Amino acid sequence: MKCSHYRSSLLLLALVFFFMGSVTSAQDNKNPTIHASSIQILMAQSDEVKLPIEFQLALYENLIEQIQKTNKFQHVYRDGDPGASSNTDLVILHSNVYGFKKGSEGKRQVTTVAGATQIKVHCVFTDKTGKSEFAQDVTGNVRFVGGNLRATFDFAKKVAQIIVTNFQ
Amino acid sequence: MKIFRVFPIQLAATVLLMGVGSLAAPCLAQDANTGNAISFANTKEVLGLDGLKHNVTGTLAAENGSLVFTKGKKKIAVPAASITEVMTGEDTERAIGGTIGILTMFAPYGGGRFLSLFRTKIDTLAIEYVDTSGGMHGAIFILREGNAAAAKKALLSQGARTSVPAEVEAEAQAKPKEKQQ
C-alpha cells in the first residue's frame, strides 16, 4: 500500500518535470526574430582590458566551431574573408571583451572554490550596414575542471545557444 | 672480484645517460639562425589547425618556408608567409594529466588535490594566419619549457611576421622572474 503511494507520487513528480520542460522549450522557441543565411565572425576586440593573444584566438576559433555546429547558417565566414561582402543576407558578429580575470588551474584543482577564470564579452549582431540587430553580454567561466582556455569554450557554447534561440 | 665492483657504476652511468638522452629527445634539430629545418616533438596542438581535432600531440616543425604539424600520417602545413603574428607565453599544467588526472580527483583523503600541486612548466605558442581565401585563423600550441622562443625564431626565419620581436618578448618574460628573485 505504502509502496504504491510512493510510486504514484514519483509518477506525478515525473509528469510535472516533463511539462515544465516542454513549457520552457516552448518559451525558448517563441521569438526567433532574426533571419540571416550567413554569418561573419570578427576577431574579438579588447579595448578596455588586456587580453592575452591565446585567449583572443581561442575565443575566435571556438566561436566559429560552435556556430558552425548550430547549422543555422549556410555559410560561416571568418574575419577578412572577402566572400562575405558579396552575400546580401549576412549578419556580422562583433565581440568586445570588457572583463577578463585569469585564474589558476592549480588553485582550482586544489581548493575547488578559488582560481576561476572569467571572460565577459559584449556581443553585437549587426547587418552589413552596421545596424545593430541584437546585443547581449555573455560570460564564459571555468570554475573546476579544465584549463584556463576552457572559459572561451564555455563562452562560445553560450553564444551558440543564443543564436539557436534568436535566429530563424 | 674487481669486475663486480665496477659493474654497478657502469650500470648507474648507463641509466644516467639514457635519462639525459630522453631529455634531449624533444628537439630533433635546432638551427633557428640559419633558417634550416627545426622540429619539436611532443608538441600539443590545442586548437586552430584545420583537419585536426583539439589537443592532439604531434611534431611541430618549421621547414621549407612553412609551419608543419605532423600527427601520424596527417601533415598540416601553414605557409610561414601567411602567418601574421607569432606570440609566446608561459604556463603550467598538471604533471599527471588526461583521464588519469581526472580520475585522481576521486582519490580518497584529498590525494587528487595533493597530486595537483605537482605541475610542469610549459611554453605556449600562438599564431595568427590567413588562409588562401583571406579568412583569419588562429592556432595555439603547447611546447616543452624553453622551446617556444626557439620555435618563434625559426618561424620568423622562415618568413612569418610578428609585432613583437623575439628578443623583446624574451626580455619581457624574464622581467617578472627577476622581480620574484
Image (cartoon, coloured by chain):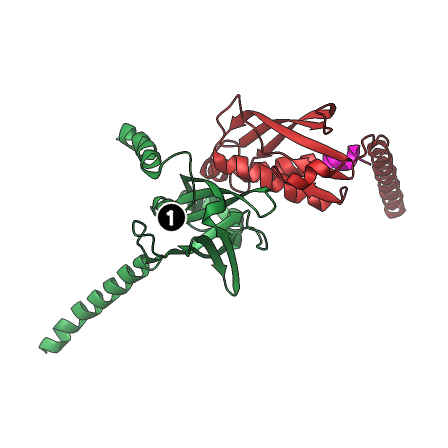
Chain colours: A red, B green
Residue sitting nearer the eye, B7 or B106: B7
Above-or-below relation of B40 to B48: below
User: Dividing the picture into quarters, in which one does residue A124 lie?
Assistant: top right
User: Dividing the picture into quarters, in which one does residue A67 lie?
Assistant: top right
**Going by the image, does B33 lie left or right of A58?**
left
Residue A160 at least partly seen: no
User: Dividing the picture into quarters, in which one does residue B152 lie?
Assistant: top left
Q: Amino acid at mark 1?
A: Ala
Seen at 50% across and 55% down, the residue is B77
Task: Name the residue that disc number 1 marks.
Answer: B151
Q: Which quarter of the image is occupied by the C terminus of chain A?
A: top right
Above-or-below relation of A50 to B149: above
Residue furthest left in the image: B2
Seen at 27% across and 59% down, the residue is B20
Q: Main secondary structure of the magenta part?
A: helix
| Residue A143 position in % (x across, y down) | 56, 35
Region rendered in magenta: A161-167
